[in-house]
Amino acid sequence: MYNEKVREAFANPKNVGFIEDADGVGKVGNPTCGDIMEISLKIKDNVIVDAKFRTFGCAAAIATSSTATEMVKGMTIDEALKLTNSQVVEKLEGLPPQKIHCSVLAEEAIKEAIKDYQSKNK
Amino acid sequence: MKSIYLDNSATTYTDPEVLKEMLPYFTEVFGNASSQHAFGREALKAVDKARQQVAKAIGCNPNEVYFTSGGTESDNWAIKGIALAHQNKGKHIITSCIEHPAVIKTCKALEKQGFEVTYLKVDNEGFISLDELEKSIREDTILISIMTANNEVGTIEPIRKIGEIAHKHRVIFHTDAVQAIGNVPINVSEDNIDLLSMSGHKFYGPKGVGVLYKRNGLKIGRFMDGGEQERNMRASTINTPAIVGLGKAIESAVENMDKNNAHVREVRDWFVKEVQSRISDIYFNGPKDMDKRLPSNANFSFEFIEGESILMLLDMAGIAVSSGSACSSGSLEPSYVLLSIGVPIEVAHGTIRFSFGKNNTMEEAQYTVDKLVETVNRLREMSPLFKQVKGEDKYV
């Protein structure tokens, strides 16, 4: 049901972990739904210099976490805020329809992390 | 890469011996078993033999055996057929909340047609309560349908006693024995069963063929309208090769039940102990008393991680299992069976069913445990829940 790209992103995810001195952390989802995504960001001069994730969830959740963290690295905050779940899905060359919500979580987690950073740096 | 099949509750392979018996009925003996000529008569002879094999295996009369397309059809026919034929007596049905969808959804469909259904709760090992069952019986109860063994957590229900209670109150008793045939000894008369469903591909027979056993004298509606096959009760051309296969498969499953069960249990029991000793934070779902669960079944929930991810990593290591998490079946709700036995919803998401077969070896079980340990550790490393609960996390 998953394409090769998703399987590969799931089997060999990038950026697994947590940035101890993160500038912003976003955590979305809840365990009863079977999905929690946590993204931590290191931000320097408005640019995301590092991104890591920890995810409780299905293969699609892990694959989208990995892909989204890869995509935002090097982006400015404004660029990252504009990242949409469909761009993540596109990067993965598609997800099964019932798994699209996983990509929404990835988008939300990044936005939460940036919001967290912004609230600390007002 | 290794290729280890631990999903025998989903389906078994067709035993080569079974296939060998089936093959001539595709080509040489291809006649329609309902035809009058020699071609037809020869096919009919084979179907009659299969009917006898089934009858012998479950202790009934051959003319109480009706061939169907599988377990789902048998369940549908039993429940809808009895409901329609006995609705003058009443419109109340009793079943359990952990039945297969073939039973539960059939009952739901009947509810829309004015029938009332009681879904008995189960305890934390999946057993129904006989007291509750008896208390639920009303004047207008016409049917009790309780599975012989559960497909997800392996619970073997006390069907003989259920049948006793049903008959004491003059209620018809149907059991979905799809998971039980070949694994659990069944005798329909001793076990007080009026109707029983089975499916060929769960005991090393072919797919697409099943049986409904119906006690003689019990009134039931037709399910398929059309020709006069199966004593005018189930229309459709007789599927001779599949029926021949089912007959051979049930014969050898029952003949070799003790031997196969002993082997499967040995491998399964070792596997369960090993998983319990090497992996922390797990739930072993279903009966703890190994005599009260299917010999093939081991069902575990692994906390802090999700079942589909486990399934996929094991699949990548060449191991085929089934996930109790609904994620894989397209819905986002975890299994209603697990929730019914009280597994917390967040834990239920991390469930895997391992179902062993007669050809699985100890080496395969060992390899599986090793890969499972790796998989669980790897996913827990990735999980934000694990670190938090384990207190290794600075950020919460």
Image: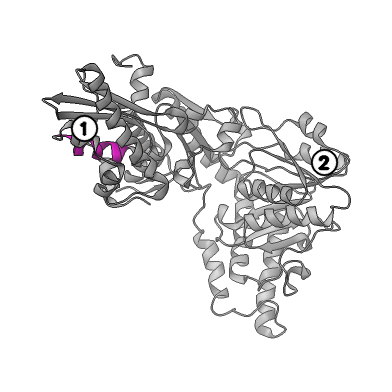
Question: Is there any visible trace of residue B229 in the rendered image?
Answer: yes
Q: Is residue B378 visible?
A: no
Query: In the drawing, what numbered circle is on residue B166?
Result: 2
Pointer 1 chain: A
The tag on residue A116 is none
x and y percentages locating residue A28 in the rendered image: 36, 29
Instruction: Name the spot of residue B229 as percent of width and height, x first.
Output: 73, 72
What is the quadrant of residue B271 in the picture?
Answer: top left
Q: Mark 2 or mark 1, which is nearer to you?
A: 1
B390 horizontally vs B138: left or right: left
Residue B225 is inside the magenta segment: no
| Residue B97 vertical position relative to residue B16 in the rendered view, above or below | above
The disc numbered 2 marks a residue on which chain?
Answer: B
What is the secondary structure assignment of the residue under circle 1?
Answer: loop
Outermost residue toward the bottom in this view: B37
Q: Secondary structure at mark 2?
A: helix
Camera-nearest residue between B228 and B335: B335
Tag 1: amino acid: Asn
Please state which amino acid type lies under the numbered disc 2. Ala
Real-space CA distance between mark 2 and mark 1, rounded to the nearest whole angstrom: 60 Å
Q: Nearer the viewer, residue B194 or B203?
A: B194
Magenta-highlighted residues: A62-73
Q: Which residue is mark 1?
A: A15
Residue B18 position, x and y percent, is 55, 62
